[in-house]
Amino acid sequence: MKKYIIAIALTGFQLTTHAQNQLDALRYSNLNYSGSARFNAMGGAFTAIGGDFSSTVLNPAGIGVYRSSELTFSPTFLQTNNDARFYNNPTEEGRLNFNIGSIGYVAVKEMDQNGWKSLNFGIGYSRTNSFSREYNLRSSGINDTTSLIYSHTNTLNTLQNPITQDQMTARYPAEIGPAYETFLLDEIGNGFYDVRFWDASGIAKSYDVINRGGSGDLNLTVGGNYKDKLYVGAAVAFSIVNFNEQTTYREDMIYSSPADSTQVAAGFPRSTDFTRKSTLDVSGAGVNLKLGVIYRPVDFVRLGASIQSPTWLSLDETFSNSYESNFENGENYFFDYFSEFSYRIHTPWRTNLGLGLILGKKAVFSADYEYLNYSNARIRDAIDPIVEFGFDEANQEIKKDFSRAHNVRFGLEYRINAPYSLRAGFRYNDNPLNDQIADDLSSRTFSLGGGYKNENGVFVDFAYSLSQYGETVRLNAVDFNNQAGQGALLDLNSHLIQFTLGLRF
């Protein structure tokens, strides 16, 4: 027998929807710039170099370096491989994604050759992050009695003001309510709640996650060149965000003894398994401003600096969550929850400093330093961007968990002969978490590439990069005594292959 129960919530009240938290703010603040093949091959170290459309993502003054107009297009292939280990069970999963790293047009208007030599304009799109990845976790359940449902019963059993069963779904519609409606937990007397697998000797688990989407900036840039010594620029960037996450979590109960006939007779059959599925869709747009400068104290040295305002994002989110349970007596229950919500996120300010060395027509070396403070990100009300009501707890967690970050980028380009160049780069994105948290979310990217440019201004560039980072995935599963189970160790290797086709004229 299969029983369906549907719940739909279309309210903006936070407690009745998928709650926004510090991870949402981190997702849209922690950028991994893509851009052109030359940009990626040289580690993204373009704050002081300029002369590449993707450099305007970091420093809009880079557009002032152009001496001729340009049109570029950069298709990108991204393969993410995830190795996970959960209760000593290894799993591997990968995902291939195609996207546009950048597409741009730069127009050069020549002016007074004795003063402001040119005024340049640029328009185009640059990708700032990719959310594409897929991983799965598996455990046999041996010597593990932790469960997601125990976290629900522990919440209910520690309330200072216990709630009635009639209040359950209204108070906790997204998680505890569905577990209650599918009879995975029950009140057993005096306001105390217990699970329907009280004598399980083990609980096997599986957890599958698929992430899709990305973010990018549509940049409108203007910059000038003063006597080939000073380059200035300003840009307004319209950010576009699209994120989708699908998860499937399953628990299978292992029993070493027959069911208690007294419990069964009382109408409490044991559960054999349950599956929780969720889908999160987020889309939105925002805007940020950039100002920058590049200065040449001597011909072979360039010094660059830029500042970027917070990105003021307006986001719309839909969240669906379902529980399905099965029992030893053949009964099956299903509960579905849906919500919609709108909110804003303000990302931190960003500052970039750069050094570039132009060694004749033979080599280029560049180094960048980027500073930002992730604890300054904020989640705001969708209507009034000043109001934090309803997000106080999330914003306090942002202040407590996040920290300052110091990112560095290095790049090298060597011209073999007139048409051919080789490139290499390194990028380090600092850990956004503070020192009190054991996890380290820093990443390292190693890159190589090359390019060809003929006398007619046609050029082709290519790049390969390998990004590496790790994290610990913790399921919200505890045992009867509220002791958490083991976390899963996740290692991610991201392989990027990119080409840029361009024309200078």
Image (spheres, helix red, strand yellow):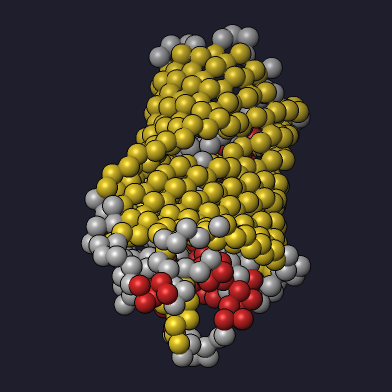
On-image quarter of the C terminus: top right
Q: Please determine whether, in this image, residue 429 is positioned above or below residue 323.
A: above
Q: Position of residue 353 (x, y in %)?
A: 49, 48
Q: Is residue 456 above or below residue 104?
A: above
> Left or right: where does residue 433 sit relative to residue 314?
left
- Percent from the top left, x then y, of residue 314? 70, 57
Residue found 73% across the figure and 65% down from its top: 10
To which quarter of the image does residue 449 belong? top left
Task: Judge from the rendering whether residue 503 lies leftward or rightward of residue 149; answer left or right.
Answer: right
* Residue under the image location 60 percent in, 60 percent down: 3
Image quarter in which the N terminus is found: bottom right
- Image position of 190 (left or right of 64): left
**Residue furthest top in the image:** 455
Kindly identify the residue that appears in the image at 40 percent across and 46 percent down. Answer: 136
Of residue 117 and residue 286, the one placed in the foreground of this image is 286
Whether residue 426 appears in this view of the structure is: no
Number of numbered markers: 0
| In the rendered image, the vertical position of residue 43 relative to residue 160, given as above or below | above
Based on the displayed image, in which of its 4 quarters is residue 74 positioned? top right
Q: Residue, x 67% and y 30% (percent of image)? A: 104
Query: In front: 378, or 107?
Result: 378
Can residue 451 be seen in this snapshot?
Answer: yes
Residue 340, image x and y in percent?
69, 61
Query: Is 17 or 331 nearer to us in this picture?
Result: 331
